[in-house]
Image (cartoon, rainbow, N blue to C red):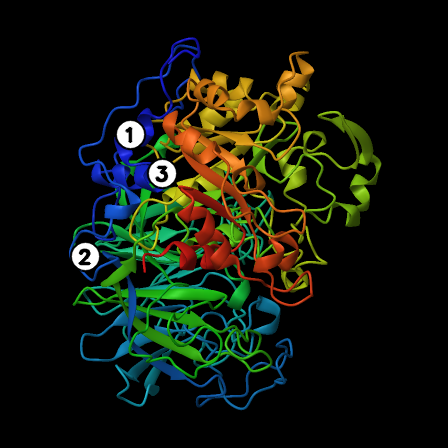
Amino acid sequence: MDHHTPTPGGLLRRLTGGTLAAVVAASALAGLVVGPAQAAPTPTPTTAPTPTTTPAPTKAPTNAPTTPDDRGSGHGKPGRVQATAPRLIARATLPADAPQPGPPSGAQATPANGRTGPFPGQVIPGFSAAIDNGDGTFWAMPDNGFGAKTNSADFLLRIYRVKPLWKKAGRGPGTVRVLNFITLSDPRHRTGFPIVNENTAGRQLTGGDFDIESLQRGKDGSFWIGEEFGPFVLQFDANGRLLRAPLPFPGGGSPQNPRAGTGAPLTQASGGFEAMAASRDGRYLYPVLEKATTTASDPRARVINQVDTRTGRYTGRNWTYRVDTDENLVGDAQMMRDGSLLILERDDQDGDAAVTKRVYRVQLGRTEAGGTLAKSLVADLLAITDPSRISAGGGWGTGDPYAFGYRSVETLVPLRDGTLLLANDNNYPGDAARRPGTPDDTEMIVIDPAARIAAPVHTATVIAHRGASGYRPEHTLAAYELAIRQCADVIEPDVVATRDGVLVDRHEPEISGTTNVANHPEFADRRTTKTVDGTMLTGWFTEDFTLAELRTLRAVERLPQVRPQNTAYDGMYRVPTLAEVLDLARHSRTCAGKPVGVAPETKHPTYFRSLGLPLEDRLVADLSAAGLNRPHAPVIIQSFETSNLKTLNRKTPVTLSQLIDCQGSPYDLTSAGTPRTYQQLVTAGGLRQIARYADDVSFCKDVMIPRNPNGTLAKRPTPVIRDAHRAGLTVTGWTFRRENQFLPVDYRRGSDPAAPGDLVREIRTFVAAGVDSVFTDNSDLGVTAVARR
């Protein structure tokens, strides 16, 4: 579609009903959504298509056009749509302070939360793996104790048989009974290296010998265990005796490998077999590395290998699972009856700071771009419904909704009825997610990953402006994941480039206000002054950093005086790449079960083009790699400039949006010597011109409904919404924020400029005036405003 050809951008609106949410819905109707029990998406090509300058393909109609106003017309309550979400079915806890028989443990453990070792008896620091015995009991296995070889020599490696006395729908005690245990040992000297209890009669194994993490049981009753110090695969008989020499990872050892010799380790410390699945017949094991190897070109790659239990050797077959971001970890893996593999993926945060506690499904052999396994979301463990309030009163994250937001969610067990059991490693005594200052209990839960729910219908599309930026530092995966949990339809990243040409997500190329770069003395000499779009700025700029350098920084709250509560998250999160944001969106679903949309804004495209870092081809390449450079993809590209949108119109079939500021001019026109103001662009004729290359126009709020001289909102909108619709464009408004200082005077509450005002009423006023989509920093309030009443 060439910009000289009078093809109205309103085509997409007419075909899909008027908003990006309708594009999302159309994608679902076209079979592009993967439900929790469905197959993964059709693989995309292994190499991204080369961006082209030929006309983009015409956007074809969907089979069933959908509008926001008729999305609730299916079964269910009026104004609601049927969807699925994980639901809490049962819960039981084992107290953190529940020592078991045995010698004192934890003499060298790091004191925390009012607990100092040595502790009487053997503590249970949570469970890293479990096996369903089919009789209401489970074999549940802690890891090496206290996290390191040096502090865990007095921790005996055990597998406990436990019986959860479930609390279900308000009934039951909700406790865990420890019935008995097996202590692992090496009486036949199979380890091949000296152990802590080398010269004792029983040669019991300890956390100073192995870091046991994953567990499966063979048909002969033996236990197969994946561990991290080697990393090794271990086999024990039913009484816990080591049967054969540890099987080393063929890819190389870790720094903690007791057999380490010369040469650099190829496995990261504590990056071994945290997860290990087994085939349904028990013949094959699938140990999964928790972290990337030290030589991996992709830091998000996690290797899955295959072990033949008959031969006790690796088969040479392997696959690559890709985590959402390179800091994420693989916590557990289990094979399903249909041959698919469930992967438990987590971050290393807990409580409110947690971002990723998710169960994904993959099919071995089904790959996507780059050859990694295609994955689909089964359950977000931070967004579990608890309508029966089984968890009520249990501290942070309990009640409805319920969050399994522990740092180390490491146990996943599929149960026979299709539900899932999960448990946490509580890193005793260190973790305190539920009640700060009190060590976390060991918590076992059962969830239905696909329970039916009735989700509200949105009368306009809610776009999470830089994520849920009213509650987390903007442009972080934490902000985006929270926005998705708050039921936003679309998440919005801002796109800038690094020195090595990687697109990353920052508000501006200058990053002193959004990262902790000023605290990094190694980058002090990169502070400089530059002119960006005619404005002189002093600070640090993304184009002066490689991605690897930028990854050493952490995000901070951009408006600390307005949102001081968000500064609690300063320093926690990395700067994400655009690719990571796209992946988070395509691996997520809205509360209504639709694909999560993405609205990347190209920041200062003329500026980056002048640096030899044009954004357009890189953006199209990232979309292609994510399988999103296609008609009806849930994507809308935005820009305050005009020429780069015209360029993109020839390169991609996705939705394009012309951003309109309250004042000033597009910088590309100013720099070309042909300035036109935004005020000129929003005349009826100007909007018809925009419709030749764009599908949507996104207005500053005051352009649509101005404020009176006294700061109150005018009673009538300007003609721009009507004129945009007549030109075939959808209309978006920005930016809706809850703080008084951003609201009209008559929508404020109290005199504190940082206090929340009546944002819900403001959004409803604009939606009533005809706005199709809204950008908001407060996704939850945006959803409240547009939920059909």
User: What is the x, y in percent for residue 619?
Assistant: 49, 27
Q: Kindly indicate the quadrant of the structure image that contains residue 423.
A: bottom left
Tell me which residue sits at (60%, 54%) in the image.
743
| Left or right relative to 621: residue 294 | right
User: Is residue 240 at all visible to an observer of this figure?
Assistant: no
Say which element carries label 3: loop
Above or below residue 241? Residue 342 is: above
Q: Which residue is mark 3?
A: 19
Residue 106's place in the image compared with 732, above or below, is: below
Amino acid type, residue under disc 2 in the picture: Arg
Quadrant location of the N terminus?
top left
> Disc 3 residue type?
Thr
Residue drawn at (49%, 50%), measured in percent from left and top? 480
- Front label number (2 vs 3): 3
Question: Alpha carbon of mark 2 to alpha carbon of mark 3: how far?
Answer: 46 Å
Q: Residue at x 40, y 29 (%)?
A: 729
Instruction: Identify residue for label 1.
Output: 14
Disc on res. 280: 2
Alpha carbon of mark 1 to alpha carbon of mark 3: how far? 10 Å
SS for dot 1 = helix
Compared across the picture, whether 29 is left or right of 372 comes to left
Front residue of this view, candidates 437 and 250: 437
